[in-house]
Image: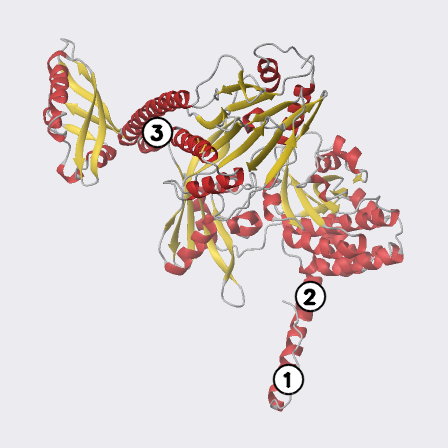
Amino acid sequence: MTSEPVTPAQSGAAPDLVELAKIVARQRAEMDRLRDQAAVSAVVERAKGAVMALTGCSAAAAGEQLLQRAKSARHTLLEECWITLGTLTPMRPGPGRASESYGIDAAGAAEAAGQPEVPDDVAAALARLGQALVRVMTPHDLARCLLEHLGSDMSADAVLIYARRPDGGLGLIGHAGIDEKLAAQWCQVPPLSGMAALDALQAGEPRWLEDFAADQRRYLLIGDPPDRWRSRAWLPVLAAGSAEVCIGVLRGRAGAFTPRDRAHLRGVTGLCAGRLRAFEMPPERDADAATDAVQALFEALPVAAMLLTPLRAATGETEDFRVEAATTQVGDLLGRTGEEPAGRRLLELRPALAAEPLWQGCLQVLATGTAYEGEPFAHEEVVAGVAELSVYTARVAPLGDALVVSWIRHGSSDRQEQRLADLQRLGNLGWANWNLATQDASWSSQVFSLVGRDPARGPVPLPEVPELALPEDAPALTRAVGGLLHDGQPFDVPFRIRTSGGIRHLRLVAEAVPDRHGTPVEVHGFVQDMTDRRRAELALVESERAILTQHDVLQAERTLASRLQQALLPMSNRPVHLAGLRVEVAYLPAQSGVHVGGDWFSAIELPDGDALLVVGDVAGHGVDAVATMAQLRFTAKGMVITGSSLTGALARLNTLLLHSRDSHTTATMVLARYEPRRRRLVWAQAGHPPPLLLRDGKARYLRRPGGMLLGAAATPVYQEAECRLDPGDRLILYTDGLVEHPPDSIDRGLEQLAEAVAAPHGDGPRSLGPLLARMLPDVRRDDVCVVDVRVPGAQGR
């Protein structure tokens, strides 16, 4: 209990209330002082008793001896008492000697008395720690006390206290500055090499870990991640010349522990030895006949059990339980093998228990008086020197104001039954047996659930099982059951039943057990629910059927679109001459996918002797794209033939697309008109790549006039551009399938086309062949349409 500051009374408060608050505060402070004084007196008296037991002197002489030791070692009396208690070593009971008597290791006492001098500030800090230790009641309290003491003095961030276990490993008995997850991860340390705490205990000397990189190579470091603490110290707590406890001080900052820090920590372990020794001594209990009888009764019990009485705080809440009696198996289940639980606090034995369901079960039973049974859990135990897993269930029952906690160990038959139940549940199946001699039948509970039958009605006789199936499935099941009963033939038959939840697909597998004459006398088998699997199979078949149907539809659509496209775009096997121009065209469909694209071209001579050159690309694929392509191709030619300008034709085509049956269709196009008399090329475009002009071995793209793709806006603006063609010029009109090859950008494709056209090559009858071979990948992902226009008249062109 600690004193609390008194909040000043507000202005206008009654004077008697203010005075009352002051009196309460003084009383609390006085109670704290008296409690600390009593605790200090208990430590001093215990140390005096130890000296008396060793030397046989009187109490006064023992007190004087302690004072002289403290004076010569520059210790306070309380420090000297802790150091003296830390040197106690258990003595074996003998004639005239109580079993709980203790002696003092003389060498240890002499070493404690002759400790080297420490700086004054360290001595003062140790004196404060010695005073604070009287309030420490558990190893966890000790860890928190040390962290508070060392945190400001040497930047300690965490303190861990490990005790040696009977198997040579370590158990975490106290910690501060780390979370419970990390504490649970490192609560048990096996006896392995590479652990600094074990190394310190075995050597009896501190281990100073001050170079993180080197320490990480040498030791397995605690931490998540380990570099959370850059420097560490592990100090064994020496008692009677040996060490069973090791204290770890972990710091986040790197750097060495100074000589002052090392002297300080050595002094700390000397004081902690006495406090830890007090923890090891069982708390005093009333040794009466009733207590002895209860303990004797529990020692005779064949199961792990303990009797608990609640320890309540000032508020009335249960803060812990005292173990009044316990069987020998309890220590192992609580992780304290070889220790005597009786007389100790439950959370002292197992601090992590406060976060486990058993703790809540104890509180629940204490509050309601209703017994509690936990879930089965696995526990590793050593039987005949071999580690094996056993399954236990913890139970808590009220006994007056106390609790009886027991652990029931499940036998192998219980585990087999549980495994069988788990198998049936996970496999959604159940077993069934029919005795043909006695006409008895037995089903597992899972079979009743699968067939939707009330267990109170009992199992169905084997000959009547087909009556459970739908009428169309019953004959097959009847034949299978008949063959089993008459000829002993096993069967595996699927069938359907109708339940309140709908149609369920089941599978019955059965075989007969014959007598020595071969006559079936017993049938055993299992029933499995196949509903989910059957639904998945049907869904898969339906999906495959839909895919095949869709593929046939797409293939038919591709065939129709391809034939329509061939009819609309007649291809010439040789170049044609229009208005004095040599024109060669090429159309290559896509090689991936099942759809046909909407690319098209047109090259005709107009009634006035001019030439009309067109390339276009409708967005999308399939019959709709081909139909739109045909509509645009013939409409564009008709408009130009009847006297419409190029820009006017594009504007009307845009309106046509906006009012078509598919309002989302768009298209790109280039319209070009060549006048042979003036060798003048007038052209317009709607969102299409520009033509490429090759002149005197140099390729360049014509500057595009304004124009938006068709079908994108209601009021687009289209412009015309003009270009004079010279003899020997070459003009390439194309769709984007020639220059767009993902993942490369279209700009890169345009550069490659210019390079390919400018490259020297033969001028054969099919001169587009080398160009297409150089530009197109092995597998075309889009249609390609090219119109190659040449102006005759130059040598070598």
Specify whether 199 is left or right of 722.
right
**Residue 416: numbered disc:** 3
Specify whether 77 is left or right of 375.
right
Q: Is residue 649 visible?
A: yes
Vertical placement of 622 versus 372: above or below? above
Specify whether 559 is left or right of 115.
left
Which residue in the protein does label 1 denote?
9
At x 62%, y 40%, the residue is 186
At x 46%, y 39%, the residue is 653
Quadrant of the rendered structure where residue 507 is? Answer: top left
Q: Is residue 301 visible?
A: no
Which residue is nearer to you in this view: 614 or 608?
A: 608
**Residue 36: numbered disc:** 2
Which callout, 1 or 2, points to the residue nearer the camera? 1
Report x, y in % for residue 156: 76, 51
Disc 3 to disc 2, C-alpha distance:
58 Å
Q: Amino acid at mark 3?
A: Gln
Which callout, 3 or 2, points to the residue nearer the camera? 3
Disc 1 to disc 2, C-alpha distance:
29 Å
How did the renderer colour the structure? secondary structure
